Image: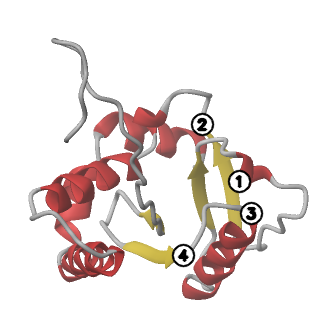
Amino acid sequence: RKRITSLGVQPIAKVDYKREYFYVYGIVAPQTGESFFLELPGLNGENFQYFLKACSKEYADSFNVLIGDNGSFHKGAKLKVPKNIYLEFLPPYSPELNPIERVWRDLKDRISRKEVFEELSQVSDEVCEVIREYYRNFSRIKSLTSYSYFLNSVALIYV
């Protein structure tokens, strides 16, 4: 703040922003509101593979269709999709067609109402608390994701 500049000219100073990340992977069943989430350290093929294996194990008794958004990690050459999972990809630039996008928006809106966080672990704790609420009340997920045009299209395609 203590820099001399010409009148009306903003001073320029170096700033060292600290950036830390974690990623939440998730699936939802719009018809029931049932959901499954995992917090993982990166958004890449290795973590997506881990997530698919965890989904496969969690829902071992059913065949599961997961909708992807064409992210490069969704289609890696080394990716091995479990036998009880089928990946369906959306057209490019159409996230509004993916039901879980509404869940991510709801989660972000609920977190952004909180105070400013000093540590990444505090953000993670808040995200986990919101996800626990989703697990306790499937109707919240169902109300966010069960829009008729999606349910009707899935019923027509996968019957």
Q: CA distance from mark 2 to mark 4?
A: 23 Å
Dot 1: element: helix
In front of the other: 11 or 65: 11
Q: Residue shown at 40%/54% (left/top)? A: 17
User: Which of the marked residues, 2 or 4, is nearer the chain's N terminus?
Assistant: 4
Q: Amino acid at mark 3?
A: Gly
Tell me, yes or no, whether the two marked residues, 2 and 1, touch with CB atoms within 8 Å: no
Label 1 sits on residue: 74
In the rendered view, tell whether residue 89 sits above or below residue 44. Answer: above
Q: CA distance from mark 1 to mark 4?
A: 15 Å
In front of the other: 66 or 118: 118
Residue at the right extreme, as displayed: 77
Label 2 sits on residue: 90
Q: Position of residue 37 (x, y in %)?
A: 44, 74
Q: Position of residue 42 (x, y in %)?
A: 60, 67
Q: Nearer the viewer, mark 1 or mark 4?
A: 4
In front of the other: 159 or 9: 9
Q: Residue shown at 18%/77% (left/top)? A: 133
Q: CA distance from mark 3 to mark 2?
A: 18 Å
Q: CA distance from mark 1 to mark 3?
A: 7 Å
Q: Position of residue 26 (x, y in %)?
A: 46, 66
The answer to whether 46 appears left or right of 33 in the picture is right
Question: Residue 40 bears which disc, if any?
Answer: 4
Question: Residue 45 bears which disc, if any?
Answer: 3
User: Which of the marked residues, 1 or 4, is nearer the chain's N terminus?
Assistant: 4
User: Which of the marked residues, 2 or 1, is nearer the chain's N terminus?
Assistant: 1
Q: Amino acid at mark 2?
A: Leu
Dot 2: element: loop
Question: Residue 119 bears which disc, if any?
Answer: none
